Image: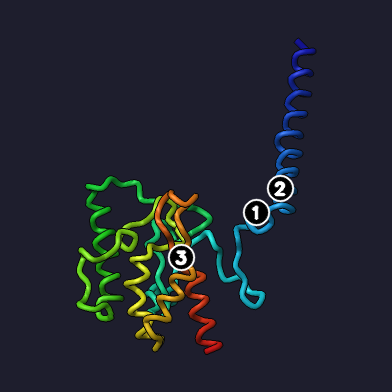
Amino acid sequence: MRKDIITSAIGMLVLTLVCGLAYPLLVTGISQVAFHGNANGQQVFVDGKLVGSKIIGQAFTDAKGNPLPQYFQSRPSGTDPADNDAGTEFANYGPNSVITEKAIAANIKQYIALNGKYYPGGLNAGKVPVDAADTSASGVDPDISVLNADIQAYRIAAVRHLSLATVHGLISKYTSGRGLGFSGEPGVDVLELNLALNRLRTNP
């Protein structure tokens, strides 16, 4: 009996040291050397200041949470607070849920209010892209669809006094292709796009 207890204790200690300490440290060390950027969340710095991440969406809003019209807006976030990378989540409600319907309706209303007066012919609910109306599974998507970006381009061009061609050129530059060439849809990196707009203003 005593021998079994000692053997079990030794086994637990060894496995704890190997699996709970040595292995995580080894993997962390390898990742920091071989994949430093990815291991640290693909952080984006401007003039030495952390401004975001390539893989985590963020809100471009004022102190009251209102969308800033001079910036492209990210996909609606299901996290609380919005775009909370420390606790990604999504609304666990079915498509027929009243809560889901109200949330989508509110997102559509805000999108139209922000972009409608700039878009040729105006916007209605039928023209609003899905990724502007509904949240993603993670709630922190860094990309928006090309259609979403193209609609917002009219607002950006008007507010920043840029040609539509210039804005579309930036959208194309920061649009990634399908995964592995065939999976999913092309996405527009909102953070990089907005940083590029800031550089245009700084260096016309």
**Residue 192 shows in this picture:** yes
66 on left or right of 23: left
Q: Position of residue 43 (x, y in %)?
A: 61, 64
Q: Nearer the viewer, mark 2 or mark 3?
A: 3
Give the residue drawn at x 36%, y 76%: 153
- Please report whichever mark, 2 or 3, sits nearer to the chain's N-terminal start: 2
Give the residue drawn at x 60%, y 60%: 42
The answer to whether the residue labelled 2 contacts the one labelled 1, judged by CB atoms less than 8 Å apart, is yes
Q: CA distance from mark 1 to mark 3?
A: 23 Å
* Residue type at the position of mark 2: Thr
Where is residue 116, by image quadrant?
Answer: bottom left
Residue situated furthest front in the rendering = 181
Up-down relation of residue 159 to residue 94 (above or below): below
* Residue type at the position of mark 3: Thr
Q: Which residue is mark 3?
A: 175
Where is residue 128, by image quadrant?
Answer: bottom left
Give the residue drawn at x 75%, y 10%: 1
Q: Position of residue 56 (x, y in %)?
A: 51, 60
* Residue type at the position of mark 1: Ala
Q: CA distance from mark 2 to mark 1?
A: 8 Å
- Please report whichever mark, 1 or 3, sits nearer to the chain's N-terminal start: 1
Q: Which residue is mark 1?
A: 39
Q: Nearer the viewer, residue 64 or 45?
A: 45
- Please report whichever mark, 2 or 1, sits nearer to the chain's N-terminal start: 2
User: Disc 1 on helix, strand or loop?
Assistant: helix
For label 3, the crowd category at 10 Å Cα-Cα, with few meaning under 14, some 14 to 19 and many 20 or more, is many
